[in-house]
Image (spheres, rainbow, N blue to C red):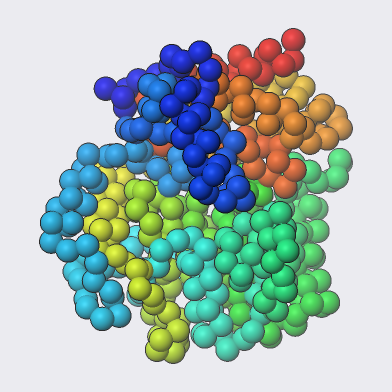
Amino acid sequence: MLRDALPKIITNTVPGPKAAALLARRHQAVPDAIGTIYPTVIKRGEGAMFEDVDGNIFLDWVGGVGVLNIGYSHPEVVKAVQEQAGKYFHAMANIVTHEGYIALAEKINAIAPVRGRKSRTFFINSGAEADENAVKIAKAYTKRPNIIVFSGAFHGRTLMTMAMTAKKSYALGMGPFPDGVYRAEFPYLYRKPEGVTDADALAYYLKSLEEVFMYSSPAEYVAAIVVEPLQGEGGFIPAPLPWIKALRKICDDKGILLIADEVQSGWCRTGRMFATDYWKDAGCEPDIIATAKSIGGGIPLGAVVAREEIMAAVPSGVIGGTFGGNALACAAALKVIQIMERDHLADRANEIGHRVCTRYEKWKQEFDIIGDYRGLGAMIGLEFVHTKKDKEPYPELVSTIIHEASQRGLIMENCGVYDNVIRFLCPLVATDAQIDAGLDILESIIRNKVL
């Protein structure tokens, strides 16, 4: 079965002839701005593996950029969607109520670690929509106009979320952007000045936030602080819990809502159902969670959850949309969550993360080009530098590694403010043999580049 296979390239070149022909058609029909650097055209996928149109078999360490935590084509999700499709595809929640929407909202209300005794959830289509709606909700509740985001952040490609996103290569020529978005520094501890302690560095990063209040927006005009529990595009950098606890206190003291962007970090990826479960354990849970990606198992779906009093402040008509909470997406999501809980995929994320980090630590000790690795659960970044001493980013090496890996049947993606980090987002249903096969491919390439 494909779900148990290992990477295998059978064509003389990658892409093979059929994939090359389809990629040429894509180039003629699809805007180049969408871009792809991968010489693959999928034919079918199962688990963590996919077969391309030429019969090559690839191990996917990207998973739709965090969409496929339960893997490709999970048979139970396929069945749930087929059963729902036999009844009806769609019922717009603003017009006709369907039970799947209610059941999914009830389930998320029960498990999402937001502050408050009772929560409410509504659905949209994507992570960017979730983030943008979370901001709207915070503004409605606080009656304040501004928000604070962070360096390294990625929140989407709508006009508002492009303003929130730090890396402006995602927003070239798209201004002017909405007003009222201000930025503080995110704690990138690997790149703190030499000799500075973590405690002193965190104090510096908190001062950066206080300076936003001083120079950009007084706290009384800030509706929300929006933060990723583990930055994705920024380089797979976990937000340190002491810093999150300090953010929570600042928000409480100044009447600001704390929004967690769990679009990529949610749904068992970090070793808990939500990365903010770690925050809750530390007594600093967020007021609002925005999530998407793996919630639908591959069907577009996003969600925003907050305590009841916050949701009650939103004026009628401000939130909603045509396809939010689509019946097929809700059926998929209910089955996805059931599988995640039943099969203990959060625990599996920790097992995978330990397996990967054991190898990464070995490489870090051996290779001077491995500067750092970090993450939570099975959301791990591997940072490449010219030397450990200078920490100079090495994006050109990462690009070469990713290309060579694709030729051997391993699909990976970079990230980071310098594009020098390889991200690990392999589906959580990958077998140990598949994880090891991917690590072997990556190590072979690294070793070849070093020797």
Question: Where is residue 94, by image quadrant?
Answer: bottom left
The C terminus lies in quadrant: top right
The N terminus lies in quadrant: top left
- The residue depicted at 29 percent of the width and 39 percent of the height is 73
Between 183 and 60, the one nearer to me in the picture: 60
- State left or right for residue 28 relative to residue 318: right
Give the answer, above or below, for where 271 lies relative to 363: below
- The residue depicted at 40 percent of the width and 50 percent of the height is 294
Between 174 and 229, the one nearer to me in the picture: 174
Give the answer, above or below, for where 396 lies relative to 156: above
- The residue depicted at 48 percent of the width and 22 percent of the height is 16
Residue 33 placement (x, y as % from top left): 62, 51
Residue 426 placement (x, y as % from top left): 46, 35
- The residue depicted at 27 percent of the width and 39 percent of the height is 74
Between 134 and 31, the one nearer to me in the picture: 31
Q: Is residue 335 visible?
A: yes
- State left or right for residue 74 relative to residue 289: left
Question: Where is residue 186, by image quadrant?
Answer: bottom right
Give the answer, above or below, for where 445 lies relative to 116: above
